[in-house]
Image (cartoon, rainbow, N blue to C red):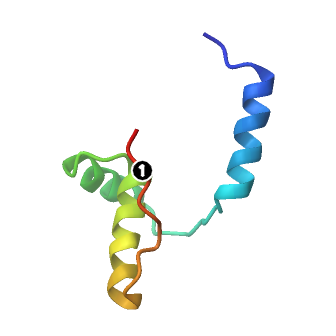
Amino acid sequence: MAVSDAKKRSNAKYDIKNYQYITFKAQAGSRDKIKIAAEVAGQSLNGFIRDVLNKAVLEATGEPMEKEKPRE
């Protein structure tokens, strides 16, 4: 089923309010290696990177980078 234009606008509005985009450069081939590591961990590429960063931020600051999302 196609997503309605209203739902797309609603999602975009939510994303603007609740997310920030962070980009970075990595050497050629790094993405493939990170993707393999994510697959081994059973995670998406985005989820894996966020998990790794969250652990590093927690170790450095004592606070997690992201709040735990409540399970539905």
Residue at 39% across / 53% down in the picture? 47
Residue occupying the point 33% across, 58% down: 34
* Quadrant showing the C terminus: top left
- Please say whether residue 30 is visible from this viewpoint: no
Judging depth in this view, the residue of 65 and 44 nearest the camera is 65
Judge left or right: residue 65 versus residue 8.
Answer: left
Kindly state the secondary structure of the residue where label 1 is placed. Answer: loop
**Residue 41: x %, y % from top left:** 21, 52
Quarter location, residue 61? bottom left
Name the kind of residue labelled 1 in the image.
Pro
Taking 40 as reference, is 27 left or right?
Answer: right
Q: Is residue 2 above or below residue 70?
A: above
**In the displayed image of the protein, which residue is found farthest to the top?**
1
The residue nearer to you, when weighing 7 against 49, is 7
Q: Residue 13, located in which quarter of the rendered image? A: top right
The image shows a total of numbered marks equal to 1
Give the answer, above or below, for where 17 lies relative to 5: below
Q: Which quadrant holds residue 58? A: bottom left
Query: Residue at point 47% right, 67% down?
Result: 66
Q: Residues within 10 Å of mark 1 (few under 14, many from 20)?
A: few
Q: Residue at x 45, y 62 (%)?
A: 28
Q: Which residue is mark 1?
A: 70
The furthest residue to the left? 40
Residue nearest the observer in this picture, 34 or 58: 58
Q: Position of residue 19 (x, y in %)?
A: 64, 58
Residue 35: image location, x then y, percent: 34, 51
